[in-house]
Image (cartoon, helix red, strand yellow):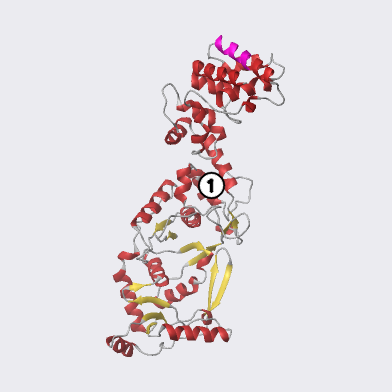
Amino acid sequence: MIRTRFAPSPTGALHIGGLRTALFSYLFAKQNNGEFFLRIEDTDKARSKKEWEAVIFENLKELNISWDNEAPRQSERGEIYKKYLQKMLEEGTAYYCFCTKEELDEERDRLMKEERAPIHQGKYRDFGLKNALKKIEEGNHPVIRFKCPLNRDVCFNDLIRGEIKINTSDVGDFIIAKDLDNPLYNLTCAIDDAEMGITHVIRGEEHIPNTPKQILLEEALGFNNIIFAHLSLILGKDKKKLSKREGSTAVSIYLEEGYLPEAIINFIAFLGWNPGTEKEIYSMEELIKDFSIKKISKSGSIFNIDKLDWLNGIYIRNMDLDKLTLRCLPFLKEEEGIDNKKIVLALKDRLKKIKDIKELSNYFYGEEVFYEKELLRWKDMSDEEVKKSLLQAKTLIENIEFNNLQEELIKEAKKSPSIGGFMWPLRVALSGQKASAGPAEIMDIIGKEKSLKRINKAINII
């Protein structure tokens, strides 16, 4: 059975890159009738926080990415890692290293001057476990290094990038634990993936240098090999590393701003993947069906907030009105006589994200709206022409029932020199905005009395 995983560190919020890794891992597992696992990598005790863990869980659930396990925490698996470390020390695939910082700095400087990779050459790799334990008893505090095979090519077939080959001369004897109680990332990752039965790991390209290390650890521990796929970076519009201003904001912020989960998932799926067709709107079920690792690009993907806005607008417009109203309510005011559902209906086509309705709906509440006199003018209309248009609208509104408002307004506008010359001053008088819902929609929501008050104010202003 295919098993993938997402293994975030709870040292901060879930960001766009992490969400894409989770989504692609989830889609690949589900389309192959496999399992998607979640694992919390919290061995960084100083920076890992329970509150960040809770945010990650909450965001994934809201985005409809579910996992098939109990989501173990690395901080609770210390004895398991210790057992493997002791095994490696006894078998000689790992060793205690007593090099001082000064010795390591000197080694690094020498190798760089010789134009060689600044990796550790393994001064203590043949020191022996008995000698090392004696040295520890004397009060020395070593780290534990992996005894890397010498001058050997580590090859793996990346599902996105094809064959990747790295020689162990460029890896060296890397540290796998500070001590028996403090294992480091590459070791815990290799052990956890093996014990969870992970078959495929999809992650960012920044992990490529870790992959040969984890493959070597798998071999040393007798684990099955894992298949890897490394995703390219997500870039800004300038094709440079994504900045916070452009989109590396926490996923929770996008949700709070009113980007719908379905739109976020649809958008994230297209960061590096393309179905090869013109289709752009995808539900999660359709993504599971059509997603293919073979169609993931090797080059960086561009984060375009305008595309997310466009997608979100489509999802908003297609959303059930009652459900949309519920989502909008936290951003709307409450006022007697005002039907917020009607406001949502009037503004839904103008929304890029749910939070937009807060600013767009202000003119529906309260008695007055505020604007400059010039805004009332349609094109080059004179004051007298604007006043005449408003008086015409006032007379109509005073004498009609609010049943077929749009029809009545259009009929009246056709009697004027221009439809715009009738509709524009009326709409501005009602909303005070350069862009707003139409006059009929506004009047239907605020009612006849308030509509006439606003029109009278406009007449006085002009």
Q: How many marks?
A: 1
Foreground residue among 337 and 285:
337
Q: Main secondary structure of the magenta part?
A: helix
Residue 277 locus on image (x, y percent): 63, 48
> Would you place residue 175 above or below residue 424 in this image?
below
Instruction: Please say if 391 is above or below 129.
Output: above
Q: Which residue is mark 1?
A: 266
Answer yes or no: is residue 367 visible.
Answer: yes
Please state the horizontal and vertical placement of residue 264, each as a whole percent of the image: 51, 47
Whether the magenta-drawn stretch holds residue 207 is answered as no
Find the residue positioned furthest to the front.
461
Q: Along the line of sight, which residue is nearer the eye, 406 or 172? A: 406
Relative to residue 453, is residue 129 drawn left or right?
A: left
Q: Which part of the image, by quadrant, shows the N terminus?
A: bottom left
97 and 423: which is toward the camera: 423
> Residue reaching furthest left?
137
Of helix, strand and loop, which one carries label 1?
Answer: helix
**Side of 60 relative to 433 (left or right):** left
Residue 438 quadrant: top right
Q: Is residue 286 above or below residue 119?
A: above
Q: Is residue 77 left or right of residue 7?
A: left
Residue type of the residue flagged with mark 1: Asn
Left or right of residue 392: residue 213: left
Q: Residue furthest top?
A: 399
Which region shows up in magenta? Answer: 390-399
How many neighbours does mark 1 have within 10 angstroms: few (below 14), some (14-19), or many (20 or more)? many
Can residue 1 be seen in the rendering of this structure?
no
Residue 322: percent from the left, percent from the top?
45, 30
Residue drawn at 52 percent across, 66 percent down:
206
Q: Position of residue 252 (x, y in %)?
A: 44, 49
Q: In the rendered structure, does residue 397 fall within the stretch colored magenta?
A: yes
